[in-house]
């Protein structure tokens, strides 16, 4: 996998042996939830010496509510959501020495105009 950070030609090559991503999505009367799990196995750093990094398992949860209404001749959609990331508060890194955030959340609002 090749990841691009910042402006070209800033490139880092990350060697990954196995990635599994799965999720469950449920919706009922405008309410939606998504549970997503990611597992990365065989993550290595270094160009030639293949320095191993620990496996990564991350669990995320998103909850949202979709509301639609008509304004004049337009149909408007409003969807507030809450995204909770790293529910298990795991300490991990995809790049050695640069830890990913622990448990964190984000509120947002999606507008369909």
Image: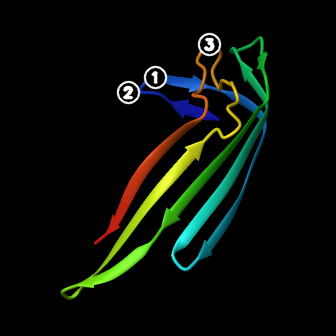
User: Which residue is found at the position 55% from the left and 80% from the top?
Assistant: 29
Q: CA distance from mark 3 to mark 1?
A: 18 Å
First-in-chain label (2 vs 3): 2
Say which element carries label 2.
Answer: loop
Image coordinates for residue 103, horizontal then vertical, percent: 60, 34
Secondary structure type for disc 3:
loop
State how many labels appear: 3
Whether label 2 touches label 3, CB < 8 Å: no
Question: Residue 97 bears which disc, if any?
Answer: 3
Does residue 22 appear left or right of residue 33 in this picture? Answer: right
Residue ID for mark 2: 7
Circles 2 and 1: CB atoms closer than 8 Å? yes
SS for callout 1:
loop
Q: Which residue is mark 1?
A: 10
- Report the quarter where the C terminus lies: bottom left
C-alpha gap between disc 2 and disc 1: 6 Å
Residue 112 vertical position relative to residue 90 in the rendered view, above or below: below
Alpha-carbon span between mark 2 and mark 3 = 21 Å
Percent of width and height locating residue 107:
43, 49
For residue 77, what is the image quadrant?
bottom left
Tell me the quadrant of the picture where the N terminus can be found: top right
In the picture shown, does residue 72 fall above or below 9?
A: below
User: x, y percentage for residue 86?
Assistant: 64, 38
Q: Residue at x 70, y 30 (%)?
A: 90
């Amino acid at each position: 996998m090749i990841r691009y950070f910042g402006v070209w030609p800033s490139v880092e090559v990350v060697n990954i042996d196995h990635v599994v991503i799965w999720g469950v999505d449920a919706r009922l009367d405008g309410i939606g939830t998504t549970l997503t799990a990611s597992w990365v196995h065989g993550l290595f750093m270094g160009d030639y010496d293949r320095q191993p990094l620990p496996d990564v398992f991350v669990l995320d949860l998103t909850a949202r509510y979709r509301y639609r209404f008509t304004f004049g001749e337009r149909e408007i959609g409003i969807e507030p959501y809450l995204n909770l990331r790293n529910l298990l508060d795991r300490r991990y890194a995809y790049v050695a020495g640069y830890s990913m955030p622990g448990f964190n959340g984000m509120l947002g609002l999606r507008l369909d105009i």
